[in-house]
Image: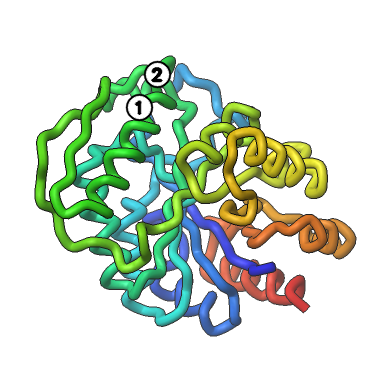
């Protein structure tokens, strides 16, 4: 089981380059970054975690630019989005951005995606809350076509384009792994239909053995090989017994949060995770 970190790459927290180097030096496997393109000041959509929206949600760098700096400063660190709000991104532009990042990093990118929760944010992008998951699927399918075909085209309700040339192609073949966040049965069905892995949240009553059985049962139901699907646990446990349970259940990766406080607080969080790895 691999150990990594996730981070809201803020404009006031630890520099993303120093963070990435610190992860690699300590033997941590990966860095996943969160994103919001913006936060509407109306704040009509309640924060899913309850209470006031944390400051870090408003101050994030663009995830792909942040990861490009992390890539340039490291050699082995896996770089991921955790998660990218895919319906809010143009699929042609995003496909090129990711292909470029994956190629220039030597094939180290993993694409964590989700539909989003902030209604006003997605509305500002022309995305409707009720159809965001259908749009997410079309964006995913269109990007797969761009990454894998010399002359890609796509026809859907939200995405339409005639044959195009788009290079570079990603280094990872057939494309960077696509990991979907969420915990519902709908999430699991989407994963086995058009994704490569799962990002459940460890703070959402996650029970490793039962949860992995749900994923594998869904894969069997729809004719997908469960061994093709990875699992990255967002907010991994810190207790040894629960970590052992994750290993035994077959979870591939656990992620822990880098705080958005001082540099010293961020680096201490990395050291704390290193102690869990032994």
Residue behind mark 1: 135
Whether residues under marks 2 and 1 lie with C-beta atoms below 8 angstroms apart, the answer is yes
Image point (31%, 68%), residue name = 171
Is residue 103 shown left or right of residue 206? left
Is residue 259 shown left or right of residue 101? right
Q: Quadrant of the C terminus?
A: bottom right
Q: Nearer the viewer, residue 127 or 22?
A: 127
Q: Mark number for residue 131? A: 2
Residue positioned most to the front: 223
SS of the residue at dot 2?
Answer: helix
Image point (64%, 68%), residue name = 3
Name the colour scheme: rainbow
Q: Position of residue 203 (x, y in %)?
A: 72, 42
SS of the residue at dot 1?
Answer: helix
The quarter holding residue 40 reads top left
Q: Position of residue 213 (x, y in %)?
A: 76, 43
Q: Quadrant of the N terminus?
A: bottom right
- Circle 2 residues within 10 Å: few <14, some 14–19, many ≥20: few
Q: Nearer the viewer, residue 158 or 57?
A: 158
């Amino acid at each position: 089981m691999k150990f990594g970190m996730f981070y809201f790459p803020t404009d006031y927290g630890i520099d993303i380059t120093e963070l990435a180097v610190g992860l690699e030096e300590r033997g941590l496997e990966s860095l996943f970054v969160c994103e919001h393109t913006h936060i509407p000041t109306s704040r009509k959509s309640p924060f899913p975690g309850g209470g006031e929206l944390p400051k870090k949600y408003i101050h994030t760098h663009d995830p792909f630019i942040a990861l490009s700096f992390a890539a340039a400063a490291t050699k082995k660190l896996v770089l991921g989005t955790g998660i990218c709000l895919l319906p809010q991104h143009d699929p042609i532009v995003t496909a090129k951005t990711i292909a470029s990042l994956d190629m220039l990093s030597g094939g180290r990118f993993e694409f964590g995606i989700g539909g989003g929760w902030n209604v006003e944010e997605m509305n500002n992008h022309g995305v409707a809350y009720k159809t965001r998951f259908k749009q997410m699927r079309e964006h995913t399918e269109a990007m797969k076509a761009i990454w894998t075909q010399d002359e890609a085209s796509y026809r859907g309700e939200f995405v339409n384009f005639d044959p195009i040339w788009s290079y570079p192609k990603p280094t990872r073949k057939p494309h960077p792994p696509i990991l979907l966040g969420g915990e519902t049965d709908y999430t699991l069905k989407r994963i086995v239909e058009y994704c490569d892995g799962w990002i459940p949240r460890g703070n959402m009553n996650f029970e490793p053995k039962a949860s992995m059985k749900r994923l594998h049962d869904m894969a069997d139901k729809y004719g997908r090989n469960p061994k093709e699907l990875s699992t990255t646990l967002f907010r991994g446990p810190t207790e040894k017994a629960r970590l052992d349970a994750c290993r035994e259940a077959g979870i591939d990766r656990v992620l822990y949060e880098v705080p958005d406080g001082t540099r010293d607080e961020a680096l201490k969080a990395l050291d704390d995770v290193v102690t869990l790895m032994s």
